[in-house]
Amino acid sequence: MLRTPDLAGCALDDRYELHALIGEGAFGRVYRGLDRRLARPVAVKVIKPWWAEDSAWVERFEREAQLLARVSDPGIVQIFDFGHAEEGPYYVAELIEGESLAARLRRGPLPVAEARAIAEQLCSALASAHAQGVLHCDVKPANVLLTAGGKVKVGDFGVARLAGGTSQALSATVAGTPRYMSPEQARGRRTTPATDVYSAGVVLYEMLAGEPPFTQGSAVELGLRHLQDAPPPLPAAVPSGLREVVDRALAKDPADRYRDGAAMAAALRAAAPQAPAGTPPPAAAGAGPAADLAGDARTSTVMTADAATIDHSSARASGADAAPTSVLGDAPTRPQPPRPAGRRNPPPQRGRRVALLAALVALAGAGLAAFLLSGAAARTTVPELRGLPRAGVEARGRRLHVQPAFSTRYAEAAAGIAIAQNPAAGTRVTEGSTVHVVLSGGPPPVTVPYVLGAHSASAESRLASAGLRYGVTLVPAPGSTPDLVTRQSPGPATTAPRGSTVALSVVEPPRWQPLTTFSGTDDGHSVPFRILGSQWRVTYNMAYLGTCSLVVVCFGPSAEAHNLQTGTSFGSFDLGEGNSQTHTFSGGPGLYRLTISGGEDSARWSMTVEDYY
C-alpha cells in the first residue's frame, strides 16, 4: 500500500520550512511554510514519491511551472520557485488566507450578485492566462480561492493539462472532476480557451443553483451527460441576462461558446444590474383612453363594413315599397310593425338557410379533420432499457420517441444501471409516452464499524467484514502507541455505500523527524524549538577555518541546551571537527533553546535538530 510521508518539520533545500499539512491531492501534498530567505509565508507543494520516480512527468511539471511563473495576474495564485530536494520535487507558491469556493458552496447557493461578481473575476483571471497561451483545464470550485477581502484567486493552474502529457497513469486522472468537464475533454479532443469557458459556466451554474447541472452517475455517465443532455433550468430568480451567459458558456460545441475568458468576463460585466434610468416622461393628456380606443379600431372597422353591406342590401330589397309609404299623405298608409334596432330589413329566408347550411358543413369538416388527426397519432415500440446507464436510457428514449421517468431503489447491480421498466420492452405506445424506469442505487448502505483505538490489522479486518474498503495514512502521534487507529472517516455508526472507502489515520512507529536546520561561523547563534517526543538529537558538521592557535589541540565552538520552561541549562557538548556527528538528549517534550558559543579558533558549522516520535 502506497503511503505518503508527512514532511511537516522539514526544511527543503535549507530554505523552505514546512510547518503544517493544509491540503492533499492525487500527486502531492501542500504545506503551509516559511521562506527563510525572504521571511514570508508560502505554500509548498511536494510531489509524492512514486510520481517523482517518473522523470518525464517531473520534467514536464518543471517546464509548466516555469511557464506559469510568467503568468502574472492579481487573480492567479503566483508560483515563486521550483526545486528538487531529497524529499522530492516541489514548487513554492503564494499562500492565500481565506476559503475555497467549494467550501463556500457547502453552505448553499450564492446570491445572484455575488455569483456574477465571482464568475467575472474568475473569467478575468482565465483571460490573462489565455492571452499567454496557458489553459487551466481543471476549473472547479476547489481551485477557486476566495480571500478574506473578497477577491478571487485561481489556483492549481495547469495541473490537469500536465496530467495528460506523460504516462497512462497520469492521463487517467484527467477524468478526476467530471462534473466540470467540457464535452471535448470527455471525448479526449483538443482543448482550447473555450474549454475553460465551459468549466467556468458550470461553476457559475453551481453558484446560482446550488449544485452542478449534472451530479449523478459514474465518470463515464457524467461525461455522456455533458455531451448529450441540456442542463436543468436555473432558478426563476436568476435574471435573463445572466441566464443567457450561462446558456452560451455551456454550449456543447466550443464554437458556440465565448471564445475565451475575456469574452465571457465582458458578457458578465454587461449582465450586471444597471442603475435606474430615471422616471419616464409623463404621458400626454388623454393618452390612456386614446390607446384603448386605438386597440378596438380593427373591430370597429369590421363592424362598420358589415353594417354598410347590410344597409345596401336592404335598400334594394325594399325599393318596391317606397312609394306607398310616401310622407305626402296622398295615399293611405298602413301601420308598419316595429323593426329590430340596427336592421331595417332582415335578409330573405333563403339566404339564411344557405348561410346556416354552410356553417354546418364547415363545422362538420372541422370535426372530421380533428377526428382524423387524433386517430392518426404516431405509434412506437418501447425499447429494452434494462441494463443501460441513465444516459443510455435517455439516448435510446430520444431515438424511439419515448420519455423516461426515473426512480431509484437499492439493488446488487451497479449504481445508476436500469433494473426495471414499465411498460415492458416491445409494448406499442403513442410517441411521447412516459416509460417508468427504475435505476439501481447500488447495494444498500452499511453501518461503519467503530475502529478508533484498534490496531490497524484488526480495524482493516472489521471494515472488510462489513463490506467496506480502507485507506491507511501513517501519521506521527507523540506519546501514542504505534499502529493504533487515531481517526476514521466516515465516523463510526454512520452509514456508507457498500464497497466505499473508510480513511484511517494510523500512528506510525517512532522515527527521527527533522525539526529545524541552521548553520554559522563561530558563535552568536541561539535557536528555539519545541520537542514532542521522548528524546531529541543534534546532528552536526564542523570544520576549522585556517590554522589552530595550538599545534596539537584546537579549541572550537560548543553548544548548550536550555529548557525554556524551567529556565535551566539542560546539557552541553563541544563540536568536534568532522561530518555527521550526533549528540542525543533525553529530556522529553518541552520548549528548548540551543545556543552556540565560539571557541578560540574560527570554525564553520551546520546542524540539524531531530525529534523522535
Image (cartoon, rainbow, N blue to C red):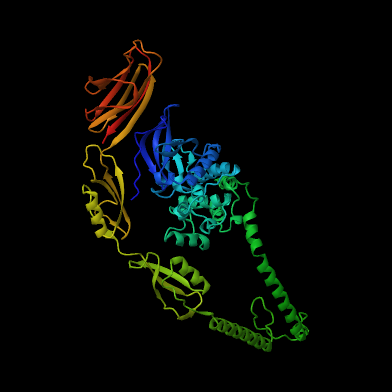
Work out whether 276 lies above or below 564.
below
In this view, the residue in front, 395 or 597, is 597
Is residue 609 toward the left or the right of residue 145 in the image?
left
Asked if one can make out residue 450 in the rendered structure from this viewpoint, the answer is no
Work out whether 550 lies above or below 252.
above
Work out whether 530 lies above or below 214.
above
Asked if one can make out residue 359 in the rendered structure from this viewpoint, the answer is yes
Where residue 92 appears, as percent x and y from the top left, is: 45, 36
In this view, the residue in front, 191 or 247, is 191
Work out whether 339 lies above or below 12.
below
In this view, the residue in front, 376 or 531, is 531
Where residue 328 appears, as percent x and y from the top left, is: 78, 80
Where residue 436 appears, as percent x and y from the top left, is: 41, 72
Name the residue at the top extreme.
549
At 39% from the left and 36% from the top, the residue drawn is 32
Where residue 327 appears, as percent x and y from the top left, is: 76, 79
Tell me the quarter of the picture where residue 532 sits. top left
